[in-house]
Amino acid sequence: MDTLPTIVMLLGASVVSVIFFRSANLPPVLGYLLVGAIIGPHALDLIGSLTGAQHLAEFGVVFLMFSIGLEFSLPKLYAMKRIVFGLGLLQVLLTLAVVTAIVTALGLSWQEGVALGGALAMSSTAVLTKLLTERLELDKAHGREVMGVLLFQDIAVVPLLILIPSFSETPERMATMMGLALLKAVVVLSVVLFFGQRLMSRWFDVVAKGKSAELFMLNVLLITLGLAYLTEVAGLSLALGAFVAGILISETQYRHHVEEDIKPFRDVLMGLFFVTIGMMLNVPLVVANAPLVLGVLAALLAVKLALVLGLSRLFGSTFGGALRTGLWLCAGGEFGFVLLAEMRRFELLPSPVLQAVLAALVLSMLLAPLIVQYSNQLVLRFAASEWLMRSMQMTQLAAKTMNTEKHVVICGYGRTGQYLARFMEQEDVTYLALDLDPERIREAAAAGENVIYGDATRHETLAAAGIARASVAIISFADARASERVLEHIRQIKPDLPVVVRTLDEKDLDTLLRAGAAEVVPETLETSMALASHALRHLGVPNAQVIEHFRQTRIGHYRTLRGFFHGESDAEADTLDVEEERLHSVLLVDGARAIGRTLGELAMPELGVEVTAVRRRNIRALEPSAETLFVVGDVVVLLGKQSALSAAEERLLQG
């Protein structure tokens, strides 16, 4: 089959599968694997030759390694060094050792054991990071441990990709290849990193001065693929060069821009890569060897759970915390498939073993979200200390607030929460702050601050904090989903309690108000108002007039300030949040459908769009009425989401 029809078939099948898996709230990678298994040579055999797709899919690994390089931050590594190079390093090494011991005991070589151990040691960065974010557990103890271990696993893939090709050689040849590869890697990395660090930032400055998105994107592709080609010519892997390119760019100010630019290439090509991995899956052979597959799956989950549990305890975690970390990390990950593809390429493993491991990894990734979902129940079931610790926390919290009434509960004791607490102290208002950062709490409590460990998104924590006796609650963090959860619990405990909520901008304002917030403070709008107040006073506008203007703005929930006009510089943000409200101007030219009609006749609200202003003959009229009659040359300013704005513009111009 020709390459183009092959790619078209892969893309079509992938789109359908990803839609299905996303609707089922499952990782898209499983959809890609399923597509590959169905259309591959061991099932429907819809694709005769995989060569074209495999060559294209290899670039998916290149861009994935590039993305990892972008995340490779020396300050971040230093801050997490104990977890990354302690817990993470030991987890990978011990998994390699245990798997190698099991494999050699079953009659395979140690090389096969090390390769398999590397594949099974990996956990899914994409799945677990998403779950930690959704469950608001990134800042919890187990969240930090999971992220540290995942970071080391990502780094460990690089040497494993260099080592695996040498395992297919004789022992003498393997030692020579490994030594030569190590020498080449040191030389290439030293040259590139030494000179590259000095040149990369200056080069990106030159490219950025061109003010061309196309030029910037071409430059990113040139550096990524150029360094990948350089390391391949040196006899190393493409992935190593891409990883180095990511490290170099991570030290520049353009890191986040590059990450967003490269993301579409990475995701699409990684999808194709996982489809080709799915094609490796021989379903009849897997079914025939079902006991072996289930045995590998059980061993994978049990061994990794036991190792991480023991290591986490060694690093000072409670049994409950260590068990929770082990449950999060026990399943396999996408880099396991990358390493399995290398093993297949160099024919390191017998087919039944490769198929059993591949199927076990797929099943473990299917189970990962379920294991995480029930991890709390499992921890409370098997860790008696967890019940005791949580009970003690609630008891301490309740004891601290037992005789407190009409106090302020501050949810979150970051920078904003601490500033709030100082204002309360200056006004002699009693407050209690809740936070989840042990070091921050220890420092603040030693200084006499009234802060205690507690998760404000939990019903029992808020109850123990005396929310039923409080006068006001303040949510000082800017996570809208977490704020909604806190508001829901407060409504259940004390529905009439005023709650002031912080948010980054106006997009979540209405949602939080509906959830029960008495006041919502959008940072971007309040910053603009603060700047305006200083400027207006310098212009001689009376202070009372400025205060009254801002008071009316807040009473109207910032209605006159909402939305902003998007431009090219906002393209990155647009890709991240297409549902954010924005402003859009439409010029009514001769022949436009809206001419001669009133605003009320056009029924814009039914499209989810508000007309905020009409400019006529360079005179701007704020908040036009339903009787406003449109004429040729009017500029209609619309506020709404992107999809709704398109429909509103069509109604204005075409009807």
Image (cartoon, rainbow, N blue to C red):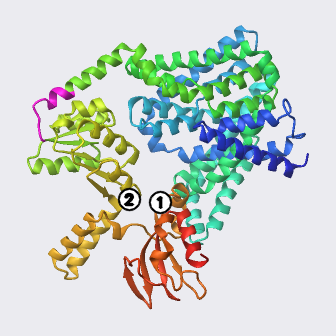
Identify residue type, mark 2: Asp
Is residue 408 shown left or right of residue 349?
left
Residue 205 position in % (x across, y down): 55, 66
Q: Secondary structure at mark 1?
A: loop
Q: Is residue 359 above or below residue 220?
A: above
Confirm whether the magenta stretch covers residue 404. yes
Q: Report the residue at 53% width, 85% height from top.
A: 595
Residue 144 in view here: yes
Numbered mark located on residue 580 in the image = 1
**Residue at x 19% of width, y 27% of height:** 398
Across and down, in percent, residue 134 comes to: 47, 39
Disc 1 residue type? Answer: Glu
Percent x, y for residue 96? 62, 20
Magenta residue check for 503: no
Front-most of residues 624 and 33: 624
Q: Position of residue 596 (x, y in %)?
A: 52, 86
Q: Secondary structure at mark 2?
A: loop
Q: Is residue 148 left or right of residue 557?
A: right
Task: For the residues labelled 2 and 1, say whether their Cβ atoms are less than 8 Å apart.
Answer: yes
Spot the residue most to the left. 428
Q: Residue furthest top?
A: 105
Residue beneath disc 2: 505
Per the rendered image, the range of residues in magenta is 397-406
Q: Is residue 172 left or right of residue 587?
A: right
Residue 177 shows in the view:
no
The residue closer to the viewer here, 440 or 140, is 140
